[in-house]
Amino acid sequence: MKKLVIDLDGVESSVDLTTEEIAELQQMAIAPTPIRTVDKRRLRTALHRLGLLESLTVAVNAAGIEAIMQWEDTTVFHEDSQLVQALILGLGWDAAIVDSIFETAGSLL
Amino acid sequence: MPFSFQGASGAVPIAGLMVSPVGVSVVDFAIPAGVRRLTLLSSGLYVPPGVIVRLGTSSGVLTSGYNGVQHYIGPSANYPFAGGGVSSGMGFDAPRSEGGNGSFCMTFYRLSPNAWNAAGQSKNGEYTEIVSGNIILPSELTTFRYISPVAINVGSLQLLWEY
């Protein structure tokens, strides 16, 4: 692996990385990616447009009173929340479906 | 490709370099003495998670001691104010845009002889990232390092400096 070194005159040279530099690159922490959020109105509209609202409602009702309360009282849903992840898992939605929900919701005014 | 602009008095208030560092993960720029402000611009560069900028002195490039925060914001309803946090301290985070493609700008100000403040933002996509931070160097700045966890495959970097 190489690094590009540019001196004060703008002269470029290619230099081998040191063992320590290579190790650090390999261990460099991955920056967190943002967690998607969606408000309830956009989420319900997106689910309706994608034909998923009914199955989600059934899943929420089947999950018990606390899940129902959480669904009804939450105004902004975070993708990594326990409820959202449990519903995704329970409904068997894959990443493409989840992406389409957030993309559809995100396009709504 | 070095370049400079001549001021009316003959001084050189701004100068810089533009490079296309394809195939490398680390880019070191030598910095002239007396620089007060640096501006880093990327063009068409893929910026994966984990890209950082470090500053160095004649004793070497600092690998810790960077204070910083980063935050994601965006015009999409999915990212109204989508979170962020305290940076790792290993360097200044380079701001990313959706998908890691596009452009960003970072500015570094010398607040006192060896204290530097950084601020930056990425090109607007579905979300943009804003970053801010600072570090106190043990001596005068001599090196500016851009580090990508994976080799750069496309795009260019431009570094401007002002006295």
Image (tube, coloured by chain):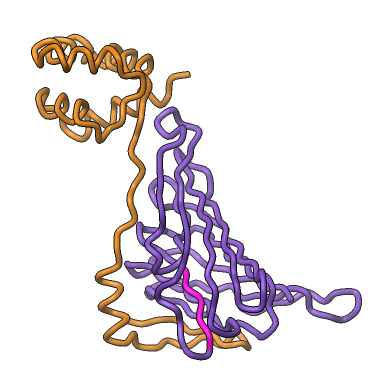
Magenta part of the chain: B53-57
* The quadrant where residue A85 appears: top left
In percent of width and height, residue B44 lies at 49, 58
Q: What's the residue at 43%, 64% (across, down)?
A: B154
- x and y, in percent, of residue A78 in the image: 31, 31
| Residue visible at 25% across and 71% down in the picture | A26
Which residue is found at the position 57% from the left and 62% from the top? Answer: B118
Q: Which chain is orange?
A: A
Residue drawn where x is 35% and y is 17% of the image: A40
Please determine whether, in this image, residue B102 is positioned above or below residue B55.
above
Describe residue A29's horizontal placement relative to residue B104 as left or right: left
In this view, the residue in front, B19 or A53, is A53
Task: Give the percent coordinates (x, y) of residue B57.
Answer: 53, 85
Residue placed farthest to the right in the image? B9
Q: Is residue B56 magenta?
A: yes
Q: Which quadrant is the N terminus of chain B positioned in?
A: bottom right
Q: Residue B133 location in percent, x, y?
A: 52, 61
In the rendered image, the quadrant that contains the C terminus of chain B is bottom right
Chain identity for the colour purple used in the image: B
Tell me the chief SS of the magenta region: strand
Please tell me whether residue B116 belongs to the stretch shown in magenta. no
